[in-house]
Amino acid sequence: MYSISTALYLETVEQLAATIGVSNYFSGSITFQFGEVECRMTTSVIVYRQHLSMPDGEKEIITDLIPVWWEFHTTIDDTEQLNDFSFTTLRKHI
């Protein structure tokens, strides 16, 4: 079984946030390479945001993702590997 590291959770959050953009709901897939592992996440999530006022302007940041449905696949050398991905753990890294 492939163990999901903190670094991979952080990369997944970054990739997902970039794909979500300013939307409050996302349904789709992201695919990215993490070292030797090809990762694919297919998900439908409700996006919660917080409004921040900063000296250089205002922005909305993602504060939580509520999954409606998700799958996380890891592939090494064209062979899918079972993994221990947890959406609860992903949410801790937002």
Image (cartoon, helix red, strand yellow):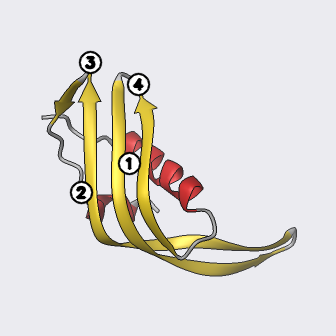
Point out residue 40 in the picture as x, y percentages from the top left corner: 35, 43
Q: In this view, does 35 lie to the left or right of 81?
A: right
Q: What residue type is labelled 2?
A: Ser
Could you tell me how far apart the alpha carbons at marks 3 and 2 are, in whole angstroms?
A: 23 Å
Query: Residue beneath label 2, please?
Result: 86
Cβ atoms under marks 4 and 1 closer than 8 Å: no
Which comes before the other along the chain, label 3 or label 4? Answer: 4
Closer to the eye: label 3 or 2: 3
- The relative height of residue 46 versus residue 9 in the rendered view (above or below) is below
Which comes before the other along the chain, label 4 or label 1? Answer: 1
Label 4 CA crowd tier, 10 Å (few <14, some 14–19, many 20+): few
Numbered badge on residue 9? 1
* Residue for point 35% across, 60% down: 43
Q: What residue type is labelled 4?
A: Gly
Numbered badge on residue 35? 4
Could you tell me how far apart the alpha carbons at marks 4 and 1 are, in whole angstroms?
A: 13 Å
Q: Pick the residue in front: 71 or 50.
A: 71
* Residue for point 51% across, 48% down: 15
Q: Which amino acid does label 1 sit on?
A: Tyr
Numbered badge on residue 23? none
